[in-house]
Image (tube, coloured by chain):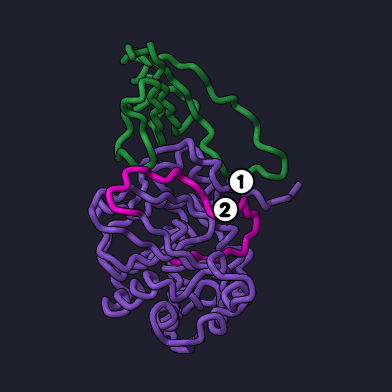
Chain colours: A purple, B green
Amino acid sequence: MTTTDTRHLLDSKQVATFVARGFLRFDEIVPRTLCEEALAEIAAGARPSHYQAKRGEPASRWPGQPLDEVWPDSVGLAAIVHSPAIAGIIQSLVGPRAIYDHHYAHAIEPNQRWSQPWHADAIVDPRTAFDIQLFFFFQDTPRAMGGTMILPGSHLRRVNESDVARYQNFVGQMPTVCNAGTLLVCHHGIWHCGQPNITPTRRVMLKLRLNPSVPQRLLWNTADLGDTAISGILGSPEPWHGNEARLEVVNRIKLWRHLTGDARFDVDYWLTRLENQAG
Amino acid sequence: MRQQILILCLATPDLGSPVLAWSFYDGTGRATGMSGDSDKPPFPSVLAAMKEGWRVMQFPMLMPRAAGHEHETSHLRFEYVLERMVQA
């Protein structure tokens, strides 16, 4: 779904936060009635991923198709991704007619004490263009239930899947503790891991990966593009960055330039200094 | 005797610099760590762990960054591996 109503698009400071931290969090953005509908749909297996689909079934051909064509209906998960608020987020980051990559309902069974090792999804990905992954939490998720833990600011690091599995804890790691209907929108590179569920209730996190359909240039509501707060957002390190904090800022500047088309954008002169070839 | 391994990733190569990430692997099988199981590092630095009897087994090599890839980041660079031997 394409929205032309800028009220539902992200603003520049939100996109800068996504560039800096690798995620945006939207608490209770999905109404509870739709959460229940989605959970019922998942429990019934009514909208299988292409992994689960039998050969020849439509779902087996979904990857690479526009999301609107893959899920043209208006119930459950389709109703959620087509809602103006969520469609606006998607359009702001990957453009109108986002491309469906895959989705999967990740379930952590009751009393599961095993913790998933840290990893980044897919394989090492050197693109500047990025995919987004939507992590939906349709249940109230206290810490005892998980939820998915993410490492803010890890998305621009080049690692291959479980290369990071030897790490167990980081200063600044963030478990997703939230009410039903909360959505994390993540850069494809973010490091994350499923957390133990020591409650008697099965926990489900629905992940949907989407690819850009157009060059990712100024796709959001750019009315605040000149806001001086943007430099501060892009220049704020995460507590685990240590000696590499400035390199992270440089990589964010490069991504921000890519998204805005402003080849001279800088934060604290970090890149401009290096681009001076005089002499 | 069994080996316990503590991995501490530091902010800089200085052994007294702050811990950014940590892992614990327990050869006794009693208390091996896992992702997300603690919010605070067990020691503020490698030096602090040494003062509590942990022995440093491995230092990170201080490699120059590859030409043309000077700004790329991936793993944490200053990873120290420590051990102590305990009764099984």
Q: Nearer the viewer, residue A7 or B36?
A: B36
Secondary structure under the numbered disc 2 in the rendered image:
helix
Horizontal placement of A231 versus A39: left or right? right
Dot label at residue B72: 1
Is residue A65 at all visible to an observer of this figure? yes
In this view, the residue farthest toward the bottom is A4
In the rendered structure, which segment of residues is drawn in magenta?
A: A109-134
Say whether marks 2 and 1 touch (CB < 8 Å): yes
Secondary structure under the numbered disc 1 in the rendered image:
loop
Image point (54%, 77%), residue name:
A219
What's the chain of the residue with tag 2?
Answer: A
What's the chain of the residue with tag 1?
Answer: B
Q: Is residue B44 above or below residue B20?
A: above
Q: Would residue A252 be counted in the magenta stretch?
A: no
Give the labeled residue for mark 2.
Answer: A251
When asked about the image quadrant of residue B65, the answer is top right
